[in-house]
Structures are given as structure tokens and as C-alpha cells.
């Protein structure tokens, strides 16, 4: 009996060791032949290539490690914007899908069936190569909302210019701490004495008023720098000032949002449908209002169904943002696994670092998921 | 005479309210059509902000007036029930109708009315709509890539034979039914590999050799997804069983394998197969690019398949395992005859979703230089003779992929219903 348990394990171990041994040996021989050395020393060397779009200070004289950081931040930026927009759109579409209004739920389901059945890469290509290329040149662009320009070279919007931004940030943090304590206090009051406060509105008030005060007495000031058309050459124009959002970022965010929102919408629908009618009726019968039924009974249960698959979608969105490489948005894959690898030839190290980065993002999110799942699981007695 | 309360439409003044409601509703729609299609603004005398919203306002008011319960008119009752239950719903319905009026005519113009169908040069495209001539001229390239034109019958023939072999499983005589799994999992992949090797690749039997670099277009999409589909299923099944195993080495190997592939994006896996994998092979051995890509995608999708199958295995009640064991079945007998048939039935939708994701992922192989449909589009749109038709190309590819994926998802829903067993 024992033999039957040990043998398959031994065989598996042996096979794994053989495969890895074979690969490492070959890699060593190959690298020796080509005169490549294994090592991560190249990270501190000068990168000497430029990156079109960067959130932090970067130019060719910085190191490869810095270029990696630029790529990583660009990936996280797309993922962050995409997650927020996809969640908003997904929740709206998911609720619309359940609407009793025939026109609304049909529109929602057409949207879902349409966007989820077209490969994401094609959608990115469509937005980037077809739709955004139809936009006007900078000199012909018309004003949008009084201050922005949509051009073939990107979207130009006013950029906020802060003075004493750190004081403002501090005020927001103080407001959040106050809200936290107030919410705890209100909950305690309700549990002990049954007094209910309008927690939401008071919190909102705190959140708005405290940062506003800093404008009056803290020396915080906000102004905007507007994009201005400037002639570079005979027929070449560009915009100065303001914030320039490259078309790659726009196309990528648009495609990721529209694609992922369809999946989130289906999750939201499944979550809300998963709550039995009896729950709502029972809640109504003990005298809760419609708002309270939704807030105290339906949503807590629906969220338990909605959140795990939705986190999975967030993860997918982050991984899918690597398709950026196809339209030359400088994300981690393009900057690091593309340009940096071409220049250094360190294929093994660079692919390993890139994969490890995505792997750690995924593992972090899964760990968080497991923790969250445990904390909201139904505690049966 | 009854007093008429204008804000509470009732049954008594049905006709009056109907007339007011319908005329207001039509006024809103006509106002919108005129201002959007003919640039005539009926309500130009109003402030700009207000005249922008008049169609919505008129339409909502109109719907408000015809919201009469139990009117006795069947169409009206149905309309009220479906799109007009309260003012908010009415406003939403109107917005969607307006959106449709706004979107459909330009789209129709672009797709059909102003589009060019005849001719075979760029000069034939004169209209403001789509230039379908471009698709017509490039059609062969989009379907078969750089595969030489006179040899394309070989691809068609292979696909027809493989399709027939796939369907043949459904018509197996009952005597041979027990070999069905064997046929699908082992025999069919071997036969189709040989077919593709000898027929599409060529080089023997007097057929001209066509290197894999020349394969492309939609047929390559099919070849890649087909092989990945058949290979990823058995591999995924093994890892799903491995992850549920009691033997620690097997369990942890499976967990690491699954979590590794699930944690990285496919594009980096393809990069790995393209630049890193050759470093791991003995010097001088060369594995074809297409095969490397198929291995990479297979391993990647196998991890997802494994997780789906594990879900099915977990969903089975313990009693099934206990009952099988009490009959004296061993591990493999129990899984093959009792557990897997039930578990796989449970996970059909999940598996179908994974396969769908696989088909949608195939365009990615362009990063290693294989030009399937999306890649061919990229090539065609940079052709100096055919500049400026990327829109038509992507719309065409989108429609094709949409048809494939949509029919797959509908088929999986049908399968799900067919195999549904009550417990």
C-alpha cells in the first residue's frame, strides 16, 4: 500500500528534475556558445532609449531598472483607469440587463453579446488604427467642453496646477480618519441606544468641508493650464501646456473597459438574480423600506456572489493590458520585454522578470481574494 | 362634464389622452429627426440648452399621457407594461429610441447604401461609405495568408476531412460507442496532425512544400485553436486530478503549474516560446515556430481548463466517491466510470467559456510573427496600394470572429440544457 503511494510521487519528481536539468544544461551550453553571461547586472546600466509616455522622470540616461519602473507604472495606470471605468459601466449594464423595460434590457444584452464575442486585440486595433485615426489634425481640432481638444495626436485637456498640494492631501487624509471614527461612533450608538445618524451625508460633508477649508486658510490654490496650439513648422502643429493623453492610452483604456465591462455586467446580473425573492419579501414584511431592503439585505448577499468573479475580471484586465505592446503603448511588456530585451539580449532574465512581475500581481490579488472570501463567508453554526 | 386632470390620465378620457400623448411623442421624435438629419431646429427660439433636451421632454410627456391602465387596447397595454411603467422608464426608453435614430442611419449608409461593392481596384471606391472591394480583393489573403493560391484547395480539403471526422463520432454504431473517448482524445489528434502535416505542409506525395511561415489568415486561426483545443483538455484533466490528489508531490506540482500559467499574460508566454524556449533546447535543434506557439497556448489554456474541471470535481457530493469505493473500484476505475462523466457534465459551460477564450486569444500569435487574420489585416493596411482602409478590415474581422464566438457560446448553452441532469 505504501509503495503505491510513493511510486507515482517518485516518478513525478524524477521527471520534473530531468526536464529542468535538461533545460538548464542546454541553456548553459547555448549561452557559453554565444558568449552571453547570466546575471542581473544589466539593470543598473544606462538604458539609452527613450519612452514616449512616462509618469515619472525618465530619459535615455537612466538605468534599465528605471525603465522597468516606467513600464510597470504605465501598466498599473492603464489597469487602474480600466478597472474603475469597467466597474462603473459594468454595474450600470448589469442592472440595465435586469430592467423590466424591454428596450433597456435588450440594449444591454446586445451590448454584452456584441463586445464579449470579439477578440480584445481586434477591438484595440479597431480603436487605435481605425477609429482614433479618423480624428482631425491638431490645427483643425474643435473645442470640446470649452477647454479640451480631440486630435489624431491625442486628447489634450487642461492640467491642474496645485500650490501646496501636500496640505490638501493631508486634509483629505484627516477627513478620512474623522469619517472612520464617526462611522464607528455611529454604529456603536445604533447598537447600544438605537439612535440612527445620517452617516452618509455627514461623512460626505466632512469629506467636502475639511479640504475646502485648506483653500481658505491653508494657502492651497488650484489653477488650470490650458492647452494652446503652437506651430512647429509649415504644416505641423502641436499643443503646449495642459495634459496630453496619448491615443495609445485612450484606445487601450476604451477597449479594455468596453470588453471587461461585459463580464462584470454578467457577474452583477448573476449576483442580483442569485438572491431569492423570499429574502426581499421577508425584509419588506418586517417593515424595512425599499432602500433599506437593498442596502441591508440584498446588497450584502449579492456582493458575496459578485465580488469573487469580479476580482478575477480585474486580474484579467491587468493581464490583458499587456496587449498594449501591439499598439506601442509603453507598458511593461513593450518597454522591458521588447525594447530592453532587443538591446541587451538577456532573453531569459528579462522574460523571467516580466513574468515574475505579473505573477506577483496575480498572487497578491488572489491572496487578498482568499482573505476577503473568508471574511464574508456565511458563518454557519 | 367631468373635470379633466391633465396629470392623471384615466380610462374615461382615453381618446383625448391618446391623441395628446401620441402627438407629443411624435413631436419629440420629429423634432429630433429634423435636427439630426436635416439640420432644421424646430425649437431654435428656445435657449440652446433647453432646445437640446426638447425631444426627450416631449417624448417623456407623451408617454406619460398614454400611460393608462387597463385601457382595453391590447397594443397599448403591452407597450405600457414593457417600456412605459413610470416616468423614469419612459425617459430611458425615449433616450434609447433617440440613440437608435441617431446611430442606425449613418451606420446603414456606411455599411450598405454608400458602400462600394463592384470593381477590383482602389479607384472603384468613390462613395463615402465602406469600400468592400478591399475585402474582396484581399479575401484570399485574409483566409489563407501567404499560402500560394493554386495550392489552397489543400487547406480546404483538410478542413473538410477533419470536420467530417469530428462529426463521424456522432454516428458511431453502438458496438463501438465505448471507444468514442479513445477516438476523440487519441486517434483524432493523430489523424489530424498527419493530415495537416502531409496535406497542408506538403513535401511528399508530389505536393509542393509550403513552410509554416506562409500559413496564415483565418485558416491559421482554425489550425491553432483546433490543436490547442484537443490537447489542452486531457492535460487540463490530469492537472485537475493532480490538484485534488492526496499525494503531496503531485498536488504541489499541479498547484504550481496551474497558478504559474494562470498568473502570467498570454503575450509573455508567447514571448517566452519565441525567444526563451530556443535557448533551452540542445544546440542545433530547431522546433518550428507554429509548434512552439501551439505548445505555449496549450499549456496556458490547460491551466484554465484544469481549474474549471476541478470546480466540477468539487461540486460532486462525497457520496459518489464513497459509493464507488465501496464497490471496490480503484482510483482510475472510480474516476473514469463514476466521477469524471458526472463532473464533466457539470462543467460544460465553463469548458466552453475556456475554449471561447482560447479562440479569442489566437490573434495574439502575431507577436511571434505568425500572421493570422488580425496579423494579415495589419499587413494589408500597410500595403501602399491600399492605404486607408483599416476600418473596413477590422470591421470585417470583427464580424467573422463575432459569428464564430457567438455561435460557439449559443451551442454551449444548448449543450448545457441537453446534458442537464436533475439531482
Image (spheres, rainbow, N blue to C red):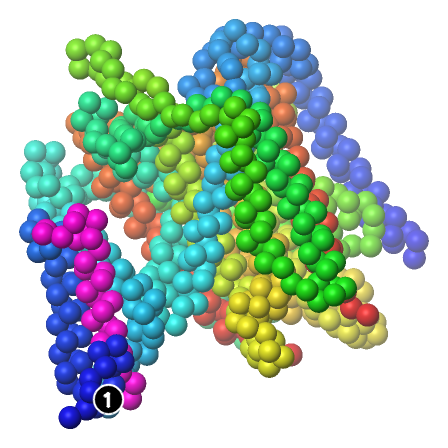
A181 relative to B328, above or below:
above
The chain under label 1 reads B
**Badge 1 element:** loop
Judged from this view, the residue extending furthest toward the bottom is: B1
Task: Report if residue A108 is visible in the image.
Answer: yes
In the image shown, does B409 or B85 lie closer to the viewer?
B85
Locate residue A204, reporting x and y percent.
54, 48
> How many numbered dots are placed on residues in this image?
1
Locate residue A193, reporting x and y percent.
74, 65
Say which residue appears at 33% left-offset and 34% top-offset. A128
Residue marked by disc 1: B11
Locate residue A346, reporting x and y percent.
59, 16
Which span of residues is magenta-colored?
B44-71
Say which residue appears at 54% left-offset and 31% top-offset. A214
In the image shown, does B81 or A132 lie closer to the viewer?
B81
- Classified by dominant secondary structure, the portion drawn in magenta counts as helix
Locate residue A324, reporting x and y percent.
44, 32
Quarter of the rendering occupied by the C terminus of chain A: bottom right
Q: How crowded is mark 1: few (under 14 residues within 10 Å), some or many (20 or more)?
A: some
Picture quadrant where residue B389 is located: top left
Task: Report if residue A73 is visible in the image.
Answer: no
A111 relative to B151, above or below:
below
A181 relative to A232, above or below:
below
Let me know if residue B25 is in the magenta part.
no
Picture quadrant where residue B411 is located: bottom left
Picture quadrant where residue A108 is located: bottom left
Quarter of the rendering occupied by the N terminus of chain A: bottom right
Say which residue appears at 38% left-offset and 62% top-offset. A109
Residue A9 left/right relative to A280: right
Let me know if residue B70 is in the magenta part.
yes
Say which residue appears at 57% left-offset and 22% top-offset. A69
Judged from this view, the residue extending furthest toward the front is: A217
Amino acid at each position: 500500500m505504501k509503495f503505491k503511494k510513493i511510486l507515482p510521487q517518485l516518478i513525478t519528481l524524477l521527471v520534473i528534475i530531468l526536464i529542468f536539468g535538461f533545460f538548464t544544461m542546454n541553456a548553459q551550453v547555448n549561452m557559453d556558445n554565444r558568449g552571453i553571461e547570466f546575471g542581473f547586472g544589466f539593470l543598473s546600466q544606462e538604458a539609452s532609449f527613450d519612452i514616449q509616455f512616462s509618469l515619472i522622470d525618465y530619459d535615455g540616461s537612466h538605468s534599465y531598472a528605471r525603465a522597468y519602473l516606467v513600464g510597470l507604472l504605465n501598466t498599473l495606470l492603464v489597469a487602474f483607469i480600466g478597472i474603475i471605468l469597467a466597474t462603473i459601466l459594468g454595474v450600470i449594464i448589469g442592472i440595465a440587463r435586469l430592467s423590466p423595460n424591454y428596450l433597456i434590457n435588450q440594449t444591454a444584452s446586445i451590448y454584452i453579446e456584441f463586445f464579449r464575442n470579439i477578440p480584445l486585440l481586434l477591438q484595440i486595433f479597431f480603436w487605435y488604427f481605425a477609429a482614433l485615426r479618423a480624428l482631425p489634425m491638431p490645427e483643425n481640432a474643435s473645442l470640446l467642453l470649452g477647454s479640451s481638444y480631440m486630435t489624431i495626436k491625442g486628447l489634450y485637456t487642461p492640467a491642474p496646477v496645485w500650490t501646496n498640494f501636500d496640505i490638501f492631501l493631508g486634509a483629505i487624509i484627516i477627513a478620512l480618519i474623522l469619517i472612520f471614527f464617526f462611522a464607528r461612533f455611529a454604529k456603536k450608538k445604533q447598537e447600544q441606544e438605537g439612535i440612527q445618524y445620517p452617516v452618509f451625508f455627514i461623512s460626505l460633508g466632512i469629506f467636502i468641508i475639511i479640504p475646502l477649508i485648506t483653500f481658505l486658510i491653508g494657502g492651497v490654490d488650484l489653477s488650470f493650464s490650458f492647452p494652446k496650439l503652437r506651430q512647429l513648422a509649415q504644416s505641423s502643429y502641436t499643443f503646449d501646456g495642459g495634459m496630453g493623453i496619448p491615443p495609445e492610452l485612450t484606445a487601450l483604456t476604451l477597449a479594455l473597459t468596453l470588453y471587461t465591462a461585459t463580464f462584470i455586467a454578467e457577474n452583477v446580473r448573476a449576483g442580483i438574480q442569485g438572491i431569492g425573492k423570499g429574502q426581499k419579501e421577508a425584509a419588506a414584511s418586517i417593515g424595512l423600506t425599499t432602500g433599506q431592503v437593498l442596502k441591508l439585505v440584498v446588497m450584502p448577499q449579492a456582493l458575496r456572489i459578485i465580488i469573487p468573479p469580479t476580482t478575477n475580471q480585474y486580474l484579467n484586465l491587468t493581464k490583458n493590458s499587456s496587449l498594449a505592446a501591439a499598439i506601442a503603448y509603453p507598458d511593461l511588456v513593450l518597454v522591458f520585454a521588447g525594447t530592453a530585451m532587443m538591446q541587451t539580449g538577456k532573453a531569459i532574465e528579462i522574460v523571467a522578470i516580466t513574468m515574475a512581475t505579473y505573477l506577483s500581481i496575480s498572487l497578491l490579488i488572489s491572496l487578498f481574494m482568499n482573505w476577503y472570501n473568508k471574511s464574508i463567508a456565511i458563518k454557519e453554526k | 362634464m367631468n373635470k379633466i386632470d391633465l396629470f392623471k390620465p384615466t380610462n374615461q378620457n382615453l381618446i383625448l389622452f391618446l391623441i395628446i400623448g401620441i402627438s407629443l411623442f411624435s413631436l419629440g421624435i420629429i423634432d429630433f429627426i429634423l435636427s439630426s438629419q436635416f439640420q432644421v431646429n424646430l425649437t431654435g427660439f428656445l435657449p440652446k440648452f433647453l432646445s437640446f433636451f426638447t425631444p426627450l421632454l416631449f417624448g417623456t410627456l407623451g408617454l406619460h399621457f398614454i400611460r393608462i391602465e387597463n385601457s382595453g387596447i391590447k397594443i397599448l397595454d403591452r407597450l405600457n407594461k414593457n417600456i412605459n411603467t413610470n416616468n423614469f422608464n419612459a425617459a430611458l426608453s425615449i433616450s434609447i429610441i433617440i440613440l437608435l435614430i441617431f446611430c442606425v442611419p449613418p451606420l446603414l449608409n456606411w455599411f450598405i447604401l454608400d458602400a462600394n461593392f463592384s470593381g477590383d481596384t482602389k479607384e472603384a471606391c468613390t462613395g463615402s461609405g465602406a469600400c468592400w472591394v478591399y475585402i474582396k480583393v484581399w479575401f484570399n489573403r485574409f483566409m489563407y495568408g501567404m499560402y500560394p493560391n493554386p495550392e489552397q484547395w489543400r487547406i480546404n480539403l483538410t478542413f473538410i476531412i477533419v470536420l467530417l471526422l469530428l462529426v463521424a463520432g456522432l454516428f458511431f454504431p453502438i458496438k463501438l460507442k465505448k471507444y468514442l473517448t479513445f477516438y476523440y482524445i487519441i486517434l483524432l489528434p493523430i489523424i489530424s496532425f498527419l493530415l495537416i502535416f502531409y496535406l497542408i505542409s506538403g513535401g511528399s506525395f508530389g505536393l509542393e512544400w509550403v513552410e509554416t511561415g506562409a500559413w496564415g489568415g483565418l485558416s491559421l486561426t482554425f489550425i491553432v485553436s483546433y490543436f490547442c483545443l484537443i490537447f489542452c483538455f486531457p492535460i487540463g484533466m490530469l492537472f485537475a486530478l493532480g490538484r485534488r490528489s492526496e499525494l503531496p508531490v503531485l498536488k504541489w506540482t499541479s498547484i504550481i503549474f496551474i497558478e504559474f500559467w494562470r498568473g502570467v499574460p498570454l503575450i509573455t508566454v508567447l514571448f517566452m516560446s519565441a525567444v526563451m524556449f530556443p535557448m533551452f533546447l540542445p544546440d542545433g535543434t530547431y522546433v518550428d515556430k507554429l509548434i512552439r506557439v501551439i505548445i505555449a497556448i496549450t499549456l496556458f489554456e490547460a491551466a484554465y481548463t484544469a481549474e474549471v474541471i476541478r470546480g466540477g470535481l468539487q461540486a460532486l457530493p462525497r457520496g459518489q466517491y464513497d459509493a464507488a469505493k465501496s464497490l471496490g473500484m480503484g482510483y482510475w476505475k472510480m474516476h473514469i466510470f463514476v466521477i469524471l462523466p458526472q463532473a464533466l457534465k457539470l462543467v460544460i459551460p465553463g469548458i466552453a467559456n475556456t475554449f471561447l477564450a482560447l479562440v479569442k486569444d489566437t490573434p495574439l500569435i502575431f507577436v511571434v510573427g505568425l500572421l493570422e487574420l488580425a496579423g494579415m489585416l495589419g499587413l494589408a493596411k500597410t500595403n501602399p496600394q491600399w492605404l486607408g482602409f483599416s476600418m473596413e478590415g477590422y470591421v470585417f474581422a470583427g464580424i467573422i470572429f463575432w459569428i464564430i464566438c457567438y455561435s460557439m457560446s449559443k451551442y454551449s448553452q444548448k449543450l448545457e440544457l441537453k446534458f442537464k441532469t436533475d439531482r
